[in-house]
Image: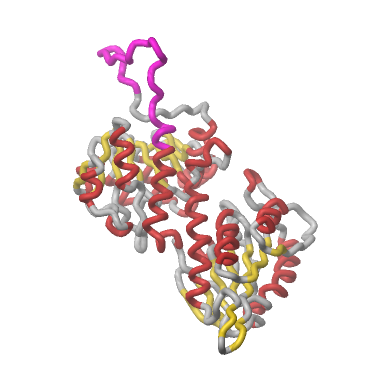
Amino acid sequence: MHIAVVKERAPGETRVALTPEVAQRLAKAGHKVSVESGAGEAAGHLDAAYRTAGATVADDAQAVAGAHLVVRVQPPSVADVERLPEGVTLVGFLWASQNVEAVRALARRRITVFALDLVPRITRAQSMDALSSMSTVAGYRAVLLAAQHMGRFFPMLMTAAGTIPPARVLVIGAGVAGLQAIATARRLGAIVEAYDVRPEAREQAKSLGASTIEVDVGESGTGEGGYARKLSPEAEAKLALKLAERVKACDAVITTALVPGKPAPRLISAETVRGMRPGSVIVDLAAETGGNCELTETARVVVKDHVTLVGTCNVPALMAADASRMLAKNIHEIVKHLTPPPPAEGAPPAASTAASAPAAPVNLDLADEITAGSLALLAGEARHPAVKSVLALEGVR
């Protein structure tokens, strides 16, 4: 299979879809790997490292020419789609509802899209779960952002100038990002509290040493696939009221509450922010989808009512080296999943004749749960319900 790695062009994106280490593994497995020149520079991987790994380094159009599979990080822009060979298979994040024009362009060019944000969260797909990988990075970095903007130590310190008490940190949302934030804040010595609408997530937070906040909202917060479910307005208001008491008592609050396909739930009001200690920090990892805090400003760090609100977007890109390392390993597993299986023992090798086309270089087994769940588009045709609704609204397919 010919696999091409393109350079990310989205502002602020520093990650690369394949590292030289993974490119070398793919080359040794018999794949041809081509990399767009400069694709890995922001993550610390120069063109020479890819050449040493056995990949070909080329300019934009040459890198993807003849490729069967193109791998990238960010959803493509319409201009990015136009650079792709028609009918190629693309692996990367898509976020269809937020990138309607790009999805339409992909459909027009009959592109097949294996979307990283659609990989089902099942045991067999754990090694391909890029969402979890990037959430791990975001949760870790969120604590460092809180430490950067907070004028306090995290741990308790016994000094000649007296005893400095530990910081109090509240983590709202105990999914992958939240659990990593809890673990990191605990390692730094903070006293950590946590809340999640899912009881099983609260139990996981306890296992990491956090105390948990219990709120009876009168309904279940567990949705499909283990994700959180959006609460009713009444339940959300009740939860926000209870959380306000704990938020005001903390030095740093890290919010990670997300609901797939919907705006982030508003859990911290402007009034609550006004009641926080001067110098406190809120790191809002939900900033890209509206924010968990009413005063969060997307992609900005602002101070309001003496509280610093961090609305930084694409937090994993702040740790390009390790984020790329994790993402590349996820994509490597996907490539292995999409590689045609070898012929059965004793079976003759597949032969190409004028009457029979050669086997497809990308194995798309639509009966497989992982493939079926991750395919956003198949040769331009919408496969996933979210993508079908996007294209239906636009009158495409």
Q: Position of residue 283 (x, y in %)?
A: 54, 70
Q: Position of residue 381 (x, y in %)?
A: 44, 35
Query: In the shown orientation, is residue 131 left or right of residue 66?
Result: right
Q: In the rendered image, is residue 100 in sight?
A: yes
Vertical position of residue 366 compared to residue 230: above or below: above
Residue closest to the far bottom: 161
Please count the marks in the image.
Answer: 0
Q: Quadrant of the C terminus?
A: top left
Viewer-proximal residue among 46 and 183: 183
Query: In the shown orientation, is residue 87 left or right of residue 157?
Result: left
Q: Measuring 80% from the left and 57% from the top, which residue is drawn there?
A: 218
Q: Quadrant of the N terminus?
A: top left
Extent of the magenta region: 334-359
Vertical position of residue 163 compared to residue 14: above or below: below
The quarter of the displayed image where residue 280 is located: bottom right
Colour logic: secondary structure
Is residue 350 magenta-colored? yes
